Structures are given as C-alpha cells and as structure tokens.
Image: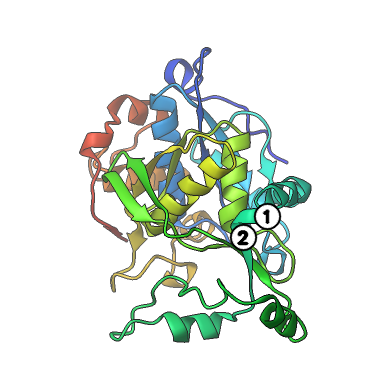
Amino acid sequence: MIDIRGSSAESRSEPSDRVGAGRYAPSPTNDLHLGNLRTALLGWLFARSTARRFLLRIEDLDAARVRPGIAEQQLADLTALGITFDGEPVVQSSRLAIYREALTSLADRTYECFCSRREIAGAASAPHGTPAEYPGTCRNLTDAERESRRQTRPPALRLRADGARQTIRDLLHGEITAEVEDVVLQRNDGVPAYNLAVVIDDGCSGIDQVVRGVDLLPVAATQAYLATLLGYQPPIYAHVPLAVNAQGQRLAKRDGAVTLAALAAESVGPDAVLGLIAESLQLAASDERIALDALLERFDPDHLPRTSWVV
C-alpha cells in the first residue's frame, strides 16, 4: 500500500490545527478517469483551503464489481497528481458489523421490500419515461403478505421516510429542501447498501464537508435525514459539475484516453493532466504547468464553473 500521509503544500494543505474533514471515496472497480480525478482534486482543494483533514475511503461493498489491484492503482494515480490524504484509508468491507449494528437501531424505521429493479422501474416510471423514486409498493404489506413473499425472494430493507422533508446546505447550489426517499439500507443479499454505509462512514470519520459529483445531489437530502436519525450532524455539501464526452454523456473509460495510464501512453504525464484539469476549473491558463500548492492559492469556490466539463 502506498503511503498516503505525505505532504506537498505545507502551510495550507497540512494545517496543524484542523477542524472537520473532507473525503474522497472511490469504488475499486476501474481506473480513475479525468472526471474522477477532477472531483478528487476539488475535494482536496475544498478541504485544504478550509483547514480540514482530507480522508480516503475505499467503497468496496459491491464485491462482484471490485477488481484486484484497482484500489492501489487509484491511490497511485491520486498520488501522481500530488493529492495527499490524512491517516489510513477507511475500507468499507471491514466495517460490516458497524453497519449492521446501525440497522438494528433503525429497526422501527425500516420495512422489508421484495421488489426487483425491473419491477420498480416499471411501477415508478412517469408517463414520459423518466424514472421516479420508489413508489412504496411494499411499504404497507400485511404480515401475511410479507410471509408469502419471503418464500420466493429474500427482502431488502428500506428506510420508512413517511413523507419527511430535509434541508441541506450546498456550497454551489445553496439551500435545498427535498422529500426524503425510501432508499434501500440493506440489499436482499444481506449486504449493507450504499446510502447507509456512506452516512455512517462520514459520521464516524468526522466528515463535515462532502464534495462529489452533481449526479448525487438528488440523494443528498435523504442521506442528511438518515444522518440525523443515526445521531450525526449532516455535512455541508458541494456537488460539482461532471466531466462529459462530446455527446454530453458522463465520461467513461470507453471514451478513449481519459485515464492516467492511457494518457501516459500518448506521452501526456501527470503534470500535464493536472494542468488540463486546472484549466477546466479556470484555475490555470491553457497549457500552463502549475503545482498543487499554487492551485490552492488560486482556489475560490465562488468562481468555479457551474457547467459540465466537455472532455
């Protein structure tokens, strides 16, 4: 495992009297692409510019999609850009007992759900074809109905939100109030679900600033509500624009030379990649080579682009 505790920007990136923390939390399923690296850099800039620690979490609960060696490669790529972390990484697969203890404490706020993804998509689609949130199919099943359905399919566990509403504070989008969704907290294979795990991990780690892609903005109110149920203070959010391809679709490895390894094969090194990302954030001029500590000095969230980066 690569040492993640080094420092490259002394005074502001490694303050001695830090309050709170930010984080970056990749899933070890594929190499990081330019969009992932850009979000990681933004997380680092937000955290270090506000004297926060910056933590790494490995979100590996979906074991079927985890690839050996990818977590190490992701960390190597982040390190190549100069992004540093505090302490040791949190690995979700080592924390199953903590998630299950939390589920037990939420027993009176959950219900069994027997719906498949296909059934949910069919039941929850609006007339124009846009998927809506879970329609509550299993919310009010009788004991007899639940017992009957257990014979054919193990249940997932969902949060019983009961129409609650939650307000979040986002540094780029302002205050947003939204209805809390009945999200899955435990999958039907018994594995704790994403929405539960991230809330617990953020709370346990003292993370009070969450910087991530704007595609996750719709679940932020639900996660903040769940945090309050579990006794945590919801974090401040910054949902940042995504990197997209020429067709406006979310960037992916299939779009070509968008990972550090692929770019290196075309003689584009980490310094040039950092400059490219900095240019996309309007923190550097075209083809300018700039160090991470200089980016930190220039960083101002109020002047960040609010639109997607077309790669």
Above or below residue 189? Residue 240 is above
Q: Position of residue 289 (x, y in %)?
A: 34, 37
Tag 2 residue: 110
Discs 1, 2 touching: Cβ within 8 Å: yes
Establish if 135 lies above or below 69: below
Secondary structure at badge 2 equals strand
Nearest to the observer: residue 259 or residue 135? 135
Can you tell which mark lies on residue 234? none
Q: Give the structural element (helix, strand or loop) at label 1.
A: helix
Looking at the rendered structure, the kind of residue marked 1 is: Ala
Q: Residue at x 47, y 72 (%)?
A: 134
Report the side of 156 relative to 214 (left or right). Answer: right
Q: Amino acid at mark 2?
A: Thr
**Residue 209 visible in the displayed image:** yes
> Percent position (x, y) of residue 41?
43, 41
**Alpha carbons under labels 1 and 2: distance apart:** 6 Å
- The structure residue drawn at horizontal position 54% and vertical position 57%, both measured from the top left corner, is 261
Quarter holding the C terminus is bottom left
Front residue of 88 and 201: 201
Is residue 267 visible from the viewing direction of this image?
A: no
Residue 287 x %, y % = 28, 44
Where residue 241 appears, x then y in whole percent? 32, 53
The image shows a total of numbered marks equal to 2
**Residue 153, picture quadrant:** bottom right
111 or 41, nearer to the observer:
111
Determine the residue positioned at 38% across, 66% down. Answer: 250
Residue that carries the numbered disc 1 in the rendered image: 107
- Mark 1 closeness class: few <14, some 14–19, many ≥20 residues within 10 Å: few
Colour mode of the rendering: rainbow
Within 10 angstroms of label 2, few (less than 14), some, or many (20 or more) residues? many
